[in-house]
Amino acid sequence: MKISLPKTDLLSFKNLKKLNRLPFVLSFREKILFSFFSLLFILGIILFIISFYLAHTEIVPAHWGIIKEGVVGQPRFINPIYADTNDPDRDLVELIFSGLMKYDAQGKIVLDAAKSYEVLEKGKVYEVELKKNIYFHDNTPLTADDVIFTIKTIQNPSFKSPLLKRWLGVEVEKISDYKIRFVLQNPYPEFLENLTVKILPAHIWRNISPENFPLAIYNLKPIGSGPFKFESLQQDSSGLINSITLSVFKNYFAEKPFIQKITFFFFKNQQSLISAANSGLIDSFLLPLTVQNHFSNLKLYTFKSPRYFALFINLGKNKTLDKPEIRTALNYIIDRKKIIGEVFDKKGLEEISPFLPEIFSIQKPGISTPNLEKAKTLLKNNDFQLIDGKWVKAEKEVKMKFTKDLTVGSEGKEVENLQECLAKFPEIYPEGEVTGYFGKKTKVAVIRLQEKYFEEILKPSGLTQGNGRVGPATREKLNEICIVSPAQNIPFKINIITGDETVLTALGNAVKSQLEKFGIETTLEILPLNKLKQDIIQKRNYDVLLFGQVLGLLPDPFAFWHSSQREYPGLNFSNYKNKNLDKLLEKIRVESDINKKKELISEAQEIFLEDMPAIILGSPDFIYYANPKIKGIEEGIIITPSQRFNQISKWYIKSKRAFKK
């Protein structure tokens, strides 16, 4: 049986016409209900669309924005082979150039321009393959020729690169246009850090002589292969650079930055930079921790670093400090927590070991400081006394000793001693001649001595006048009165030399205050940094040097404590020598197994702490201030301030929603 339903067409013109009459048909109450449910229906559709959009999209950074970065100092060489000595140069090089390798946010070495690398021949050969999509900012491809040119330029003494020492003995060979071989004299696992050096474009620099290299315009208008390229430079009427603007490089081979431009503003000193920050003229900047400003409108970021400041004791220069017990006493006096609080605004690590256990995850020494009672015991055990609040060493009286009979014609050292003693009494030996020969003048002087002490020398022997002969009674008196040096209390004095940088000066004053409070007389000599390096450090002309040292992120303490590094340009500032430590340091630098390396470093640490050739003060953080609008800044571990930019591609100002991938 077939059933047919009436045909309806709700969308027909006729039915639509009926719908138009609906408002006239419905009652007032029905109109209200109809409008209400219609609104609910429309809102439901809107909410569904919004919910669908939110569920299938996410907030992501947008390619937009400019950062205004403040820096103290002037750029001189925006050039990888020279930039190592000037912070403004290093900042700009970090953004404009790329290296074979780079550091990530946690201080690990990762690939940059290198596609891959291989370690061969038990660590003596490194073969690196380049990525093929890398271009310099003038759109010239980066190849093996550029890498080889950069390394050979550094290795050429005529160019006077501060990086020269790192590349001594390294041979670099071209395998193909995109593959390079590095041959080392000895295995060196830390060689990967060398490969973070930034690469110069050979086609730009190849025909520039060593003499003209520092003068080339490309030192201030550089061409690199990094995420940002040089755009413009502004100078004042005197030639000082006010600002340099970088813009994002659209053909950058890696993750392209979201920030489109960075303008660096250069300031003469910290105070002018701080003033600009308070006025809102700059968005971000890095300051030494001794400048304890708190900017309410800025966010503070801290970066750990494998560096430390220390008192380097020049062994052999000051006899008192040559004793390990005395150096250990100084170690117990220093209140590191107070230094980190007062000098570094509580942003840093208390360290007593130069191997930085907290950075490199090795066993931390179980030594608690300060410990003033232990310090006092060590000093007292070494003949020091606390007198009127000052530590002094009681020096005993030193006398000459006469053992022979002396008479006219005698000669030698004992006659010299006799003449020196007699010369201290002008009424006895007015001539004061010290010849080592017992002559007539000496005999007359001895007679005067005998007659002056008649009761003690002549009378017991039944003599009525002197005979000029040094016999038992005369010797006894000479041994009593012939004093080389009288008993005296010698103050415990320490002379510290450091540079005129803000951090060094603040540290020097803090250490001086602590030592003087304990009772040790301390002088602090502050010199211009250039003079300190050239006249003092190079010549090792100091008792105690207050200075800093920076380690690599792959630990290799050889350069700082091996005895072969005691003379300039070595970095063993303490003139320290220990055969057992030398052997350990030699093993550490060739050991590729990280766990075995840490075991060796822990052994080296024990030897260091037993000898205490330097007093490690602490490892401060780097502090970076940035406008809260700048997002994506990741705190981590960096070696130099410029490495705050090693994750610049993740920084952003604006965001947007995008469909999830």
Image (cartoon, helix red, strand yellow):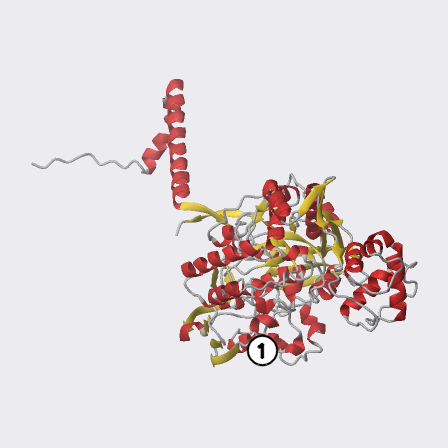
Q: Which of the pair 455/321 is nearer the observer?
A: 455
Q: Which of the pair 294/95 is nearer the observer?
A: 294
Residue 526's x, y, as percent?
Answer: 75, 54
110 relative position to 211: left or right:
left
Quarter in which the N terminus is drawn: top left
The residue that appears at 92% across and 63% down in the rendered structure is: 430
Q: Residues within 10 Å of mark 1 (few under 14, many from 20)?
A: some
The residue that appears at 38% across and 33% down in the rendered structure is: 44
The residue labelled by disc 1 is 152
Q: Is residue 335 visible?
A: no
Residue 340's x, y, as percent?
Answer: 62, 44
Rendered view: 203 above or below 350: below
Secondary structure of residue under mark 1: helix
Q: Which of the pair 539/409 is nearer the observer?
A: 409
Q: Is residue 407 visible?
A: yes
Residue 75's x, y, as percent?
Answer: 70, 62
